[in-house]
Image (cartoon, rainbow, N blue to C red):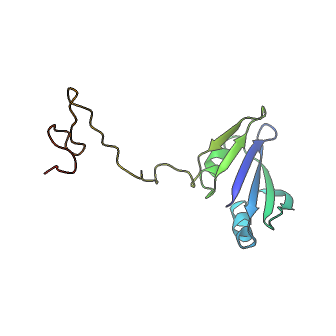
Amino acid sequence: MVTANLWKIETNTYSIQVNKVKPKQRKEIKQMFKGWKETAVGFHRDGSQLFIFSKELAKDESIYKFAKQLPFPLIEEKKNGEEKPVKTQFNDTKTRKPLTSSKTYGKIKGVRSCSKCGAKGHNSRTCKK
């Protein structure tokens, strides 16, 4: 799976390293980073490729607006070594659905209650509602 790291070089200059790029994905990655300068190219031991792109942004341009469109996870590396995940299209929580609904009802005065309707005297398996 393709992953990427982002770091700030100077005031408005950023670099993004894209890792584990398969040969079939090369064209798509280069198309995504059109307008960026290809700083370095390398290979991993498994045969996948890595690219480093850099770009000097205008004062009104935001790196996070560009990063939001990327379809793979992106991690920002701060100057002090701290890593912070950046919201991208890959990890946007608005599009993900929770696996199960979390409707939990508490106990009513120490007596167990139904988890479907919340009434006491029966459980969810024997609930008639």
Indicate the quadrant containing the N terminus: top left, top right, bottom left or bottom right: bottom right
The x, y position of residue 89, in whole percent, is 56, 54
* Residue most extreme to the top: 109
Q: Nearer the viewer, residue 69 or 51?
A: 51
- Residue 75 spot, x, y in % from top left: 68, 45
Q: Residue furthest bottom?
A: 24
Residue 81 lies, in percent from the top left, at 77, 35
Residue displayed at 80% across by 65% down:
46
3 sits to left or right of 56: left
- Give the residue displayed 71% in from the left and 73% down from the top: 24
Residue in the picture at 56% in, 51% down: 91
Q: From the viewer's perspective, is residue 1 above or below residue 8?
A: below
Toward the viewer: 9 or 58? 9
State the residue in front, 105 or 42: 105
Residue 10 in view here: yes
Count of numbered badges drawn on the protein? 0
Image spot of residue 50 (x, y percent): 80, 60
Does 64 sit left or right of 54 as displayed?
A: left
- Regarding residue 34, the answer to whether it shows in the image is no
